[in-house]
Amino acid sequence: MAYKITDECISCGACEPECPNEAISEAEIIYVIDIDKCTECVGSHEAQQCVEICPVDCCIPDPEHEETREQLLEKWERLHPGETPKAT
Ligand code: SF4
């Protein structure tokens, strides 16, 4: 399932460059995650990079966007054509 950023976000911007899929961007008030690009870091890393770096723990799984690992990997492959997944 895609991750989302809660209202606790302090807009520090630490997560944006860490996302391997460029899924994070600055919105009007807080940062947001594009659900079409978030793979829970499947394909790139063992752990969610935004979760690891966030100083206020505001990156959380979004239960409204359930996806299987297989779907996440397919999404990663669409985002990184020709590349080999580093973490599955
Ligand atoms: Fe990006 Fe990974 Fe966070 Fe999803 S979980 S927004 S892919 S850093």
Image (tube, rainbow, N blue to C red):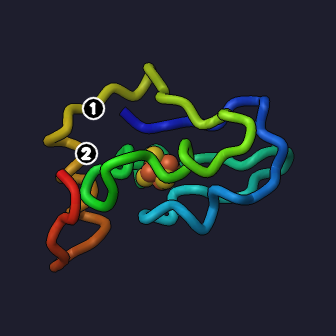
Q: Which residue appears at 48% of the width and 27% of the height? A: 62
Q: Which residue is mark 1?
A: 67
For the image, the number of numbered tags is 2
Q: Tell me: is circle 2 under 8 Å from ligand 1.
A: no
Q: Describe the element under mark 1 as helix, strand or loop.
A: loop
Quadrant location of the N terminus? top left
Label 2 environment density (alpha carbons within 10 Å; few <14, some 14–19, many ≥20): many
Q: Quadrant of residue 78?
A: bottom left
Residue 72, numbered label? 2
- Residues under numbered marks 1 and 2 in contact, where contact means CB atoms less than 8 Å apart: yes
Left or right: residue 3 versus residue 27 is left
Q: Amino acid at mark 1?
A: Glu
Residue found at x 19% / y 76%: 83
Q: Tag 2, which secondary structure? A: helix
Mark linked to residue 33: none
Image check: 56 left or right of 50? right
Residue type, numbered disc 2: Leu
Residue at (27, 32) in percent of width and height? 67
Residue under the point 63% across and 56% down: 15
What percent of the width, then of the height, locates residue 86? 21, 65
Extreme top residue here? Answer: 63
Residue 66 location, x and y as percent?
Answer: 33, 26
Q: Is residue 51 left or right of residue 37?
A: right
Residue 75 locus on image (x, y percent): 26, 53
Q: Work out whether 67 lies above or below 83.
A: above
The one of 76 and 17 positioned closer to us in this rendering: 17
62 sits left or right of 40 in the view: right
Residue 69 picture location, percent across and down: 19, 38
Alpha carbons under labels 1 and 2: distance apart? 7 Å
Disc with the residue nearer the chain's start (1 vs 2) = 1
Spot the residue most to the bottom: 82
